[in-house]
């Protein structure tokens, strides 16, 4: 009977392993097909991505019609869903996880999109935004008070999902994201750096407000996937550098792209008194920008003048070079993971961040 029990246990382990492999199998793309573009990368996690928005809607169920409408407003499948895609690809690059772990990894991708969207709701109130994702900003439509409550509600429900994962380590990792968002916003509100310190402060703020979410989420799915400590560190490094590269490109587009292409107002950072990478680099060629930055673009004509000076400088070029450097660091971190279509897809994602136009 002992031999029979051992044989049965062995068969169970094999069955579980095969189930996990099916869970993480490539969708619609043969494994021999190279992943060379973002559409091919998305196909690898297409089925899991389809479940993100519907599951978020279920998680945000409430009997209050006002809160329901406001909290659902940005979850209309018109966002890029860049974060869930990247997190799911990282989960699968870590290797085949047991079905329960795979389910929790998908929940992390959901949580990340909820935290990100809640932060956008709060940002729209702070910034008094009028447009987001090509439509009326939530605060303009629902008012500041309900928008803040909707953001809080989304965060609360994301915390419930996080608790349901049942991993104290993952709770610790993702709780850091909320703290970082608050610290990043406070740093932005009280920016006091001067001269050469401004770039260092800008990169740190960018990590806190944008990159921490990707870094910690990639770390969380690597932890759930049973990765080594080195691989978990690599997953964090990939998310950190990818997030910083993403935001630098976003800041470049805020200066050079049209509002129609971006789906939101442009030059908003300067209108809010914020100096980003293109402006900070332009200071080296046009020192008068230092005084404009110091007074937070508050004088009439400051924003127009700053945009003109940036356009005449190498500020955009140098900012793009900085983004390329962080993208390369993200790519280098992937060497810790075994070759797979999902690892290849993460390489493609790191390049796509640099190439985007909106």
Image (spheres, rainbow, N blue to C red):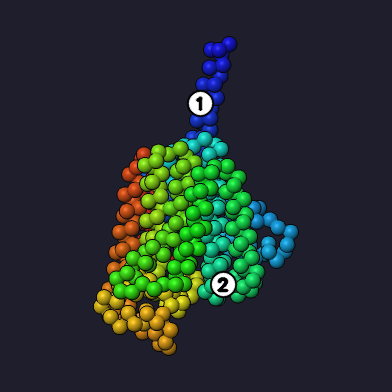
Which SS class for mark 1? helix
> In this rendering, would 120 be left or right of 333?
right
| Mark nearer the N terminus (1 vs 2) | 1
Please state which of the two labelled residues, at mark 1 or mark 2, is closer to the viewer.
2
Q: Is residue 357 visible?
A: no
- Who's the residue at 54% across and 21% down the image? 9
> In this rendering, would 327 be left or right of 90?
left
Q: Position of residue 92 (x, y in %)?
A: 45, 42
Mark 1 lies on residue? 14
- Residue 142 placement: quadrant: bottom right
- Residue 100 placement: quadrant: top right
- Who's the residue at 56% across and 16% down the image? 5
- Who's the residue at 56% across and 57% down the image? 114
Q: Is residue 127 visible?
A: yes
From what the image shows, is residue 44 above or below residue 97? Answer: below
Q: Position of residue 106 (x, y in %)?
A: 54, 46
Looking at the figure, which quarter contains the N terminus?
top right
Q: Work out whether residue 16 or residue 260 is closer to the camera in this orientation and state it.
A: 16
Q: Position of residue 118 (x, y in %)?
A: 56, 62
- Measured Cα–Cα span from mark 1 to mark 2: 52 Å
Looking at the figure, which quarter contains the C terminus?
bottom left
Label 1: how many residues lie within 10 Å, few (<14), some (14-19) or many (20+)? few
- Who's the residue at 35% across and 52% down the image? 330
């Amino acid at each position: 009977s002992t031999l029979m029990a051992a044989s049965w246990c062995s068969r169970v382990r094999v069955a579980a392993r095969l189930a996990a492999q099916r869970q993480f199998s490539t969708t619609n793309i043969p494994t021999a097909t190279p992943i060379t573009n973002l559409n091919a990368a998305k196909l690898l996690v297409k089925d899991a991505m389809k479940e993100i928005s519907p599951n978020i809607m279920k998680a945000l169920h409430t009997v209050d019609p006002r809160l329901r409408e406001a909290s659902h407003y940005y979850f209309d499948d018109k966002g890029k869903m860049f974060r869930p895609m990247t997190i799911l690809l990282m989960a699968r690059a870590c290797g085949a996880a047991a079905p329960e772990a795979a389910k929790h990894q998908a929940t992390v991708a959901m949580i990340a999109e909820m935290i990100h969207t809640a932060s956008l709701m709060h940002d729209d109130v702070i910034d008094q935004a009028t447009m987001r994702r090509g439509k009326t900003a939530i605060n303009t439509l629902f008012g500041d008070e309900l928008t803040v409550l909707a953001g809080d509600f989304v965060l609360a429900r994301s915390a419930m999902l996080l608790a349901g994962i049942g991993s104290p380590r993952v709770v610790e990792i993702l709780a850091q994201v909320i703290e970082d968002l608050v610290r990043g916003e406070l740093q932005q509100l009280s920016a006091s750096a001067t001269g050469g310190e401004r770039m260092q402060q800008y990169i740190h703020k960018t990590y806190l407000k944008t990159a921490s979410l990707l870094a910690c989420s990639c770390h969380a799915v690597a932890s759930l996937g049973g990765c080594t400590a080195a691989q978990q560190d690599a997953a964090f490094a990939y998310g950190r550098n990818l997030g910083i590269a993403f935001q630098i490109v976003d800041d470049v587009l805020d200066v050079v792209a049209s509002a129609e292409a971006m789906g939101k107002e442009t030059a908003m950072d300067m209108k809010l008194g914020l100096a980003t990478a293109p402006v900070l680099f332009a200071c080296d060629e046009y020192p008068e920008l230092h005084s404009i930055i110091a007074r937070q673009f508050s004088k009439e004509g400051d924003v127009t003048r700053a945009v003109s000076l940036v356009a005449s400088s190498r500020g955009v070029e140098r900012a793009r070079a900085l983004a390329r450097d962080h993208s390369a660091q993200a790519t280098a971190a992937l060497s810790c993971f075994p070759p797979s279509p999902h690892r290849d897809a993460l390489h493609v994602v790191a390049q796509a961040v640099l190439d985007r136009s909106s």
